Image (tube, rainbow, N blue to C red):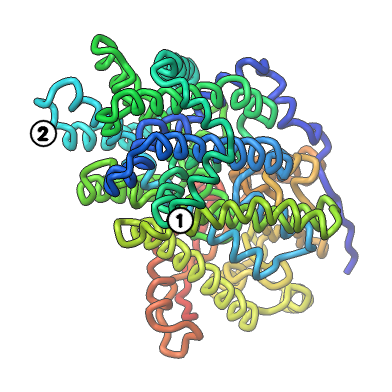
Amino acid sequence: MTKHIQIGAAEAQPAGAEGAEHGKHSTSALILGSIGVVYGDIGTSPLYALRESLSHSVKADALTEEAVIGAISLLILALVFTVTLKYVLFLMRADNRGEGGTLSLMALAESSVGGRSLAIFLLGVAGAALFSGDAIITPAISVLSAVEGLELVTHRFSDYVLPITLFILITLFWVQSHGTARVATLFGPIMVVFFAAIGALGAMHIGDAPQVLWAFDPRTGVSFLLNHGWLGFAILGSVFLGVTGAEALYADMGHFGRFPIQAAWLGFVLPALLLNYLGQGALILSNPEAVNNPFFLLAPDWALLPLVLLSTVATVIASQAVITGAFSIVRQAIQLGLLPRLEITHTSESQEGQIYIGRVNRLLLLGVLLLVIVFRSSSALASAYGIAVTGTMVVTTSLAFIVVWRDWKWPLWLSVGVIASFLTVDLAFLAANLLKIVDGGWAPLALGACSMIVMWTWVRGTRLLIEKTHRDSIPLAELIPMLEKSKPMRAPGTAIFLTNDPNVAPTALMHNIKHNKVLHERVLILCVRTENCPRVPPQKRFELTKVSNDFDMAILHFGYMESPRVPAALALMRKAGYKYDIMTTSFFLGRRTIKESPSSEMPPWQDKLYVALTKQSANATDFFSIPSDRVVELGAQVTI
């Protein structure tokens, strides 16, 4: 049996196609877009971050000048050290071919050690799971904190804050299925107006108490933290609310590129945030009663309602960015085999990243509405916020150590020194946020734990199923000589059989021979693989192997940020010389019904969960974009 391998496509695009796509847009347009999408979460933090930080001093009857300046100093320190130094200047260099985020970093770390590592895998799963808690809490606390500003306009709105918030959130999630490409063009300009407004309002009030500028001295914040025991520790936990959107800087790098995100932060967003926090602090020092809502009280009476409306729009934009991020990370998880295949809808013909996942959208909406109804105020929700984000930051920093040491080839002492400095701050924030567990911090931890159990169950069940299928299957190298001897009836045309393991005979092929007693003139065994990179260039899309005179094998390679469109890959194969006609081709897919088994290697509860997850999985026809009128499905019942 002779073999020859043909790799690639005849008409391939350059590997830098993605960079060329970015090159079509001007840098200013990318900077504007990053302001609208990347900085929504961290940009709306001033609505509640300083207020919640000083609430601990108010409860302890210790709202002094030292406490106000100390809290602002810690906020500035967090923005400069955690966001600017760690994320903007350091971590954004750890990109996986232009893409960022926890799962991208996990894939990069696995590549740097030469394959899947259990420790790296668990860190990546933990980071992705904790992100789900952040994705649910962010829309709830952001929109609720903005709508609460209506109470300052008139107390008549007090009874309507909750209904208005629920209406906005329901509308936000409802429009996801229609796509956001059209309104997304407005995100950047609106957020530019928002940042300019909050920066100007803050600058107007710094003169009320110029001593607030001492907050720029990091010793002020550190001294306050060390000299005030548990009070300083509690304030540190709330100070972290000011940097909760930092992960978005890294995760959205693939959409806008490193430089536009860095330029937007250093040149515009960071100065606006610093001015606003300083202005809030000066206002509180000159009028301590303003501590209840210093953000909105920065505005003069005539500008209060416009600021509430602008802030509400900004929080909706921030929520949209988090929802879109949730869809993206779920797609990555599906492609990396961490979750079952879910139906993914593309809402834009021109932008691959504009996607909608119905089941995820419904789960997010349910979680957000429950949080708003249960906690009822942004102050109560602030107690639940932060733990998930700090946990994700610890995971990201830990994975970065592997990349810095093994991929960047830094000396071990330098890798440990740099990462230890970041990890020390992350762990301090995490420890401070753990104080919130009783007051609501359990919510994101519970959500993250549920997500992690689901991913662990899916990975474990799928591995066991593959092992069992492999044991019960016939190697393809043994089947082909058997078929040459038995000479089954041949049907005209080409049959394509999808399989997870190209070395064994696909179940659908065996069923077709067993029940239909027929074999097509030409057979193509097709295996789709997801690589540890965001996108695979077209010239490396496929490997084609001639197994025998009438049997071919093709392995299709897709990145974890790509949709695995099989017909498009087959079109590339046809251009490269493979004889293929969609009108004379049938796709044979095996549809397995998973049943619980008393002899399963998994405990009964996990067995039931895995079976339930398989029922949520989208069929292969839709997932791989195969024409439904060319598909033949052959079912089988399987126990793990």
Pinpoint residue 496: horizontal percent, then vertical percent: 64, 56
Pinpoint residue 479: horizontal percent, then vertical percent: 73, 76
Residue at the limit of the structure toward the bottom, as seen here: 599
200 shown above or below 356? above
541 shown above or below 283? below
Label 1 neighbourhood size at 10 Å, few (<14), some (14-19), many (20+)? Answer: many
User: How far apart, in angstroms, are the residues tagged by discs 2 and 1?
Assistant: 34 Å
Label 1 sits on residue: 432
Determine which of the numbered discs, if any, sits on residue 159 in the image: 2
Q: Nearer the viewer, residue 323 or 362?
A: 323
Q: Residue at x 41, y 40 (%)?
A: 67
Q: Quadrant of residue 333?
A: bottom right
SS at badge 2: helix
Q: Is residue 389 visible?
A: yes
Q: Nearer the viewer, residue 624 or 577?
A: 624
Label 2 close to label 1 by CB (< 8 Å): no
